[in-house]
Amino acid sequence: MRSLVVYYSRTGHTRFVAQRIAEEIAADVEEIIDRKNREGRMRFVSCGKAAKRGDTTEIVEAKLSPSDYDLVVVGTPVWGGYPAPAVRTYLSKYDFSGKKIAVFCTCGRLKGRTIERVKAVVPGGTFVGELAVAVGFKKKEKIQNEISTWCKSLTVIT
């Protein structure tokens, strides 16, 4: 079974989780690159507004195609209870019919309905797992244990 972990990360939290998942399930990894500069404290507010509006954005062309994989793990930060526009754009570009899909999000405290909103953008796939990681309030070791436990449940399903 071939697996792909695809994610967007503005601050590095989602990247950290994505890399741990990829190691655990021996997956290829692809970072979604937003062409719009979203760095910095002041842009944080505009990021949340764009996510709530359901905006898409221009992203760098992916090197790996989800069509080549059996399992696609999608990761997004939580922006005001919504997935990042770069993730929404990526998901709208590909057909996930017949794919097994797992979703994870990174958040400060509350995930809101982020995972449900990601699922709504991906018709046709079979969802096999979801994980919300409150990265700002846990020690790295606890986060890694949480990821490892979740990945074991994914490997049983796949």
Image: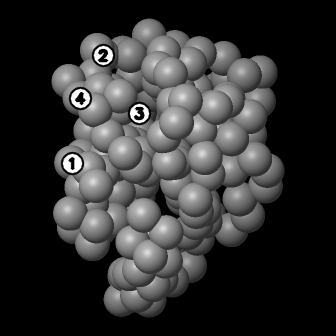
- Ranked by sequence position, the earlier of labels 2 and 1 is 1
| CA gap, disc 3 and disc 4 | 25 Å
For the N terminus, the image quarter is bottom left
Which amino acid, by three-letter code, is at mark 4?
Leu
Which amino acid, by three-letter code, is at mark 1?
Asp
- Ranked by sequence position, the earlier of labels 2 and 3 is 3
Residue labelled with disc 3: 39
Residue labelled with disc 2: 60
Residue labelled with disc 4: 64
Nearer the observer: mark 2 or 3; the answer is: 2
- Ranked by sequence position, the earlier of labels 3 and 1 is 1
Q: Are marks 3 and 4 in contact (CB under 8 Å)?
A: no
- Say few, some or many: other residues with alpha carbon within 10 Å of mark 2 (under 14 / 14 to 19 / 20 or more): few
Which amino acid, by three-letter code, is at mark 3?
Glu
Name the image quarter holding residue 64.
Answer: top left
Q: Are marks 2 and 3 in contact (CB under 8 Å)?
A: no
Please tell me whether residue 4 is drawn above or below residue 21 in the rendered image. above
- Ranked by sequence position, the earlier of labels 3 and 4 is 3
Whether residue 81 is visible here, answered yes or no, is no
| CA gap, disc 1 and disc 4 | 9 Å
Label 4 element class: loop
- Which color scheme did the rendering employ for the protein? one colour
Label 1 element class: strand
Residue labelled with disc 1: 28
Q: Are marks 4 and 2 in contact (CB under 8 Å)?
A: no
What residue is drawn where x is 37% and y is 45%?
70
